[in-house]
Amino acid sequence: MLCGLRRTDAAILTEVEKREIRGYSEAILSAASFGTIPLFSVPVLAAGMNLPSLLVYRFGFGCLFMLAILLFNGHHLHIRWGDALRLSFMALLYAASAVCLITGYSYMPSGIATTLLFSYPVWTALLMLVFFHQKLTWQTAVAIVLAFSGVFFLSGIGQDGSITSAVGLVLELLSGLAYAIYMVTFPRMRVSKMPSLKVNFYVFFMAMLMLLLYGAFTSGGLQPVGTGQNLINLLLLGLLPTTVSNVSLIMALKLVDSTHVAVLGAFEPLTAMLIGIFVFGEPFTVPIVIGFLLIITAVVILVGK
């Protein structure tokens, strides 16, 4: 009997470990794909498209990808009014984070802006401590400090010409705060029990409607796509850092806690900087090497604790 219990306990532990590994993998995939935002958005902005139009196309194409998968798998799209209100709140948070993030590109290089978004693990830990009284272990605290320090080195903050205005800094910190509220709130809402793809479809559909309204008042409405290259970039923007990233994020939040998912978001600035180095020919400096090492160390501590 005792041996049977031991085998059962071992099996349970194995299932827990598998669940955590899957959650960590989903979080890393989400962060890495999210880090590709500058790769697809900066060329479109440089071609003359305004911010609201860019975000409308991003969320619109993301919705089309998700809708196609939902219909192919035979999922119904019905939701209750209460769930619609909850999803609207999530959409508002996500839209606000996206607007602040990409608006910040006007005040600093996109790679630095993306790394500053990584303030959200700190916001997440603080929100969990203050509002949900989550115990902060020393391993998680060390991982947060190391990851945040790594982002500091990656961003180039403090170097000449890195940030031209405090407005950009505030925008990116607000973007991180809105994203942190999104991550902390979602697992505690009833809609977290819905299929991940369905949740994301409605979040982005509602965010798209909000941004259409925002664009109508701020920039005169939706701009045309323009060139074929713009279309390709917008489609990829809707696929990788929108559909893939956010479906993976929701799946990760269902498997591991918000703080761990947030710290694994360190792969966002890593991806952004690697794109800058290998695609745009940006220099691979000593601070970047230090940043890489600090972030990898943080991830190892977090996952191995």
Image (cartoon, helix red, strand yellow):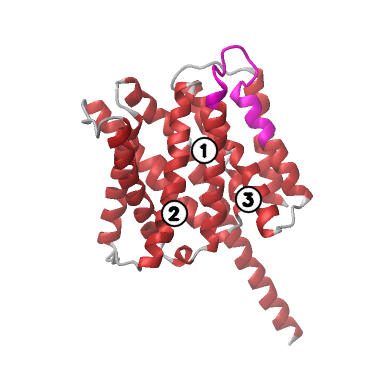
Q: CA distance from mark 3 to mark 2?
A: 23 Å
Camera-side residue of 286 and 34: 34
Magenta-drawn stretch contains 160: yes
Is residue 257 rendered to the left or right of residue 240? right
Determine the image quadrant of residue 78.
Answer: bottom left
Tell me, for residue 260, which label it has, or none: 3
Type of the residue with mark 1: Ser
- Which span is picked out in magenta? 148-168
Residue occupying image coordinates x 74% and y 52%: 136
Residue drawn at 61 percent across, 20 percent down: 156
Furthest residue toward front: 217
Depth check, mark 3 against mark 1: the one in front is: 1
Identity, as a three-letter code, of the amino acid under mark 3 = His
Q: Residue furthest bottom?
A: 1
Which residue type does callout 2 highlight? Phe
Residue 255 colored in magenta in the image: no
Task: Read off the residue under disc 1.
Answer: 175
Report crowding for label 3: few under 14, some 14 to 19, many 20 or more residues within 10 A (C-alpha): many
Asked whether residue 221 appears in the rendered view, the answer is yes
Residue 283 quadrant: top right
Residue farthest to the right, as pictured:
138
Residue 119: percent from left, percent from top: 61, 37
Q: CA distance from mark 2 to mark 1?
A: 15 Å
